């Protein structure tokens, strides 16, 4: 069971999604935000999804990051059962390079939003940062860490193309 000290849940459709979704966890670690990660499949473990999504708010989570590939129904189904913000990460699939995942996640009907990120690792990394940005709205210390992260990122980009 999560506590209020674990504000972010990272859920994914399969253990095979973890190498991608770990990028979200890495960014949260970098920003000092606690997270839990769970395999919750919309298709293979539907009852686990219902139990997780209906209990997520009471468990203390503030933001859900949901990654899935292929017929990626996990983010939308999770969003249908919770008022918490759901950030959807389309995991890159083998057959269709993640276009299937993206289209499965992005085109939600009005009334049940999923904030859809880019396909693959960039999307997962940005989901971690975006979750931190949401939490930083009510956490000044985190807002400061985010500002430092952005400044360091800017500083690290050289203007010259030479070594
Ligand atoms: C989806 O099917 C998962 O999110 C994963 O991206 C994809 C393939 O799953 P595995 O067959 O690798 O378990 O449910």
Image (cartoon, rainbow, N blue to C red):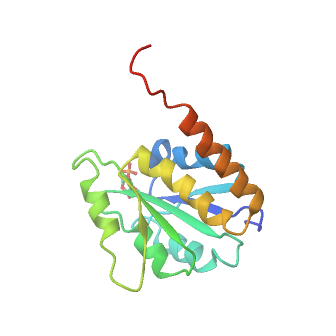
User: In the image, what residue occupies the spot 48% across and 64% down?
Assistant: 87
The answer to whether residue 42 is seen in the rendering is no
Q: Quadrant of the N terminus?
A: bottom right
Q: Position of residue 105 (x, y in %)?
A: 35, 66
User: In the image, what residue occupies the spot 70% across and 79% down?
Assistant: 58
The answer to whether residue 2 is seen in the rendering is yes
- Nearest to the observer: residue 41 or residue 129: 129
- Nearest to the observer: residue 42 or residue 114: 114
Is residue 38 found left or right of 139 in the rendered image? Answer: left
Q: How many marks?
A: 0
Q: Quadrant of the C terminus?
A: top left
Q: Which residue is most to the bottom? A: 111
Q: Position of residue 48 (x, y in %)?
A: 54, 70
Q: Is residue 4 above or below residue 32?
A: below
- The image quadrant of residue 109 is bottom left
User: In the image, what residue occupies the spot 56% across and 75% down?
Assistant: 53
- Nearest to the observer: residue 32 or residue 103: 32
User: In the image, what residue occupies the spot 72% across and 49% down?
Assistant: 32
Q: Which residue is most to the left? A: 96
Q: Position of residue 26 (x, y in %)?
A: 60, 43
Q: Position of residue 113 (x, y in %)?
A: 42, 77
Q: Which residue is most to the top? A: 163
């Amino acid at each position: 069971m999560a506590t209020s000290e674990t504000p972010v849940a990272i859920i994914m459709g399969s253990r095979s999604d973890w190498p991608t979704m770990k990028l979200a966890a890495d960014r949260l670690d970098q920003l000092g935000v606690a997270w839990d990660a769970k395999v919750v499949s919309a298709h293979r473990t539907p009852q686990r999804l219902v139990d997780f999504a209906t209990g997520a708010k009471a468990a203390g989570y503030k933001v859900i990051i949901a990654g899935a590939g292929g017929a990626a129904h996990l983010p939308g189904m999770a969003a249908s059962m919770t008022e918490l913000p759901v950030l959807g990460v389309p995991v890159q699939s083998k057959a269709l390079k993640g276009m299937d995942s993206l289209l499965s996640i992005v085109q939600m009907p009005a009334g049940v939003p999923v904030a859809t990120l880019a396909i693959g690792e960039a999307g997962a990394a940005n989901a971690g940062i975006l979750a931190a940005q949401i939490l930083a709205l009510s956490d000044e210390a985190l807002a400061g860490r985010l500002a430092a992260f952005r400044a360091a990122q800017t500083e690290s980009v050289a203007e010259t193309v030479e070594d």
